[in-house]
């Protein structure tokens, strides 16, 4: 793994520190991460997505999203006098959700406005309380409020990965490499023909655990592209905590030099991150916009009691 001398040199930090009479300009948390190999991997990943320096200049972000959640079950049909049983897989439920989300990146406050919904649903996380308003009427359903709390925290955390992971309280562990290839198929020179280009590369696996801070998941395994450090896949505990889930990232967007959002496809997986079943959910983020200020702060809605903070560490699909 290459040392990140270019991280500091590129920003002119060492020169600036000398010009200021030795005053420490490199934050202590980054210095400590630079002292370990897993920390170097994480810093390279953050730089590959635009850099913590750009991220810390942003206060608010808003975006639209679409999420397709698939819950699968089976049909059981008993036929004839021998009571032969036929079990056929089927799609139990499919929830197609759309919304506009506003995040305060400094405080973690989150606002969500459902789009194309009847009735209209607004929800928010004020940092210490959560609220839901449906067609102007506040919800007092404690179960629904707790689920909204988990979902909003999960959405806020996922959107801000890998920048959420710059924290020296985390436990970082290298977890091996995976060999893979990029496949590009293009039309050939002759009609009806196609040319295929295979480019081999490696994914470095970096496990992240959260012993001293709350997180929507107990741990994450990041699959990092050895060419640029960017995240290609993320392995986590499944939403119900009973298994594992692999999320494949693609269509990453660049906004103000930050690579965020895009398309994420999630599947059940084994310990190594291999897909073991059909698609469980798809998320898309678009119309991403970073802002320094908001004309109207949407986070606070007064008039309802807040549910207790969620500390289960498990995300729940709406």
Image (cartoon, rainbow, N blue to C red):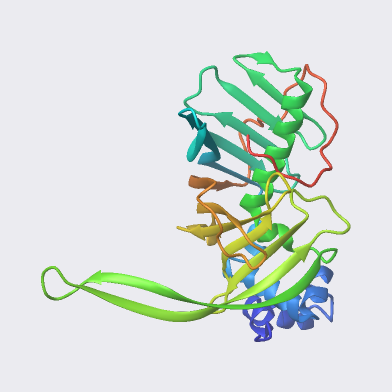
The C terminus sits in image quarter = top right
Q: Position of residue 215 (x, y in %)?
A: 78, 51
Residue drawn at the location 71% of the way across and 78% of the way down: 40
**Residue 281 visible in image:** yes
> Is residue 110 found left or right of 62 in the rendered image?
right
Residue drawn at the location 50% of the way across and 49% of the way down: 279
**Residue 261 visible in image:** no
**Quadrant of residue 1 within the rendered picture:** bottom right
> Is residue 55 found left or right of 17 in the rendered image?
left
Judge whether 273 appears above or below 129 on screen: below
In this view, the residue in front, 46 or 203, is 203
In this view, the residue in front, 293 or 263, is 263
Judge whether 227 appears above or below 304 on screen: below
Query: Which residue is the extreme one toward the left?
Result: 191
Q: Position of residue 221 (x, y in %)?
A: 68, 65
Q: Where is residue 245 in the image (x, y as percent from the top left)?
A: 63, 55
Judge whether 135 appears above or below 82 on screen: above
In this view, the residue in front, 311 or 99, is 311
In this view, the residue in front, 90 or 264, is 90
Q: Position of residue 51 (x, y in %)?
A: 63, 66
The mark total stands at: 0
Judge whether 273 appears above or below 268 on screen: below
> Is residue 310 found left or right of 223 in the rendered image?
right
């Amino acid at each position: 793994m290459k040392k990140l001398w270019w991280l500091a040199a590129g920003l002119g930090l060492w020169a600036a520190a000398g010009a200021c009479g030795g005053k420490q300009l490199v934050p202590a948390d980054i210095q400590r991460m630079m002292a370990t190999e897993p920390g170097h991997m994480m810093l390279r990943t953050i730089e590959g997505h635009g850099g913590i320096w750009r991220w810390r200049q942003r206060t608010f972000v808003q975006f639209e999203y679409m999420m397709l959640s698939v819950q699968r079950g089976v049909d059981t049909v008993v036929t004839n006098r021998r009571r032969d049983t036929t079990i056929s897989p089927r799609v139990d439920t499919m929830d197609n959700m759309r919304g506009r989300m506003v995040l305060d990146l400094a405080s973690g406050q989150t606002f969500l406005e459902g789009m194309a919904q009847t009735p209209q649903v607004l929800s928010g996380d004020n940092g210490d309380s959560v609220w839901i308003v449906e067609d102007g009427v506040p919800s007092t359903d404690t179960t629904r409020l707790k689920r909204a709390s988990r979902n909003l925290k999960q959405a806020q955390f996922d959107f801000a990965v890998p920048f959420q992971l710059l924290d020296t309280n985390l436990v970082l562990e290298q977890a091996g490499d995976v060999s893979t290839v990029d496949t590009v198929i293009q039309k050939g020179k002759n009609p009806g023909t196609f040319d295929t280009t295979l480019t081999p590369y490696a994914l470095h696996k970096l496990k992240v655990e959260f012993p001293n801070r709350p997180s929507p998941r107990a741990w994450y395994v990041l699959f990092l592209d050895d060419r640029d450090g960017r995240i290609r896949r993320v392995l986590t505990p499944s939403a119900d905590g009973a298994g594992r889930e692999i999320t494949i990232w693609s269509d990453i967007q660049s906004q103000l030099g930050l690579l965020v959002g895009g398309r994420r496809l999630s599947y059940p997986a084994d310990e190594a991150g291999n897909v073991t079943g059909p698609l469980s959910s798809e998320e898309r983020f678009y119309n991403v916009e970073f802002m320094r200020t908001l004309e109207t702060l949407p986070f606070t809605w007064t008039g309802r009691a807040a549910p207790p903070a969620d500390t289960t560490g498990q995300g729940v699909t709406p």
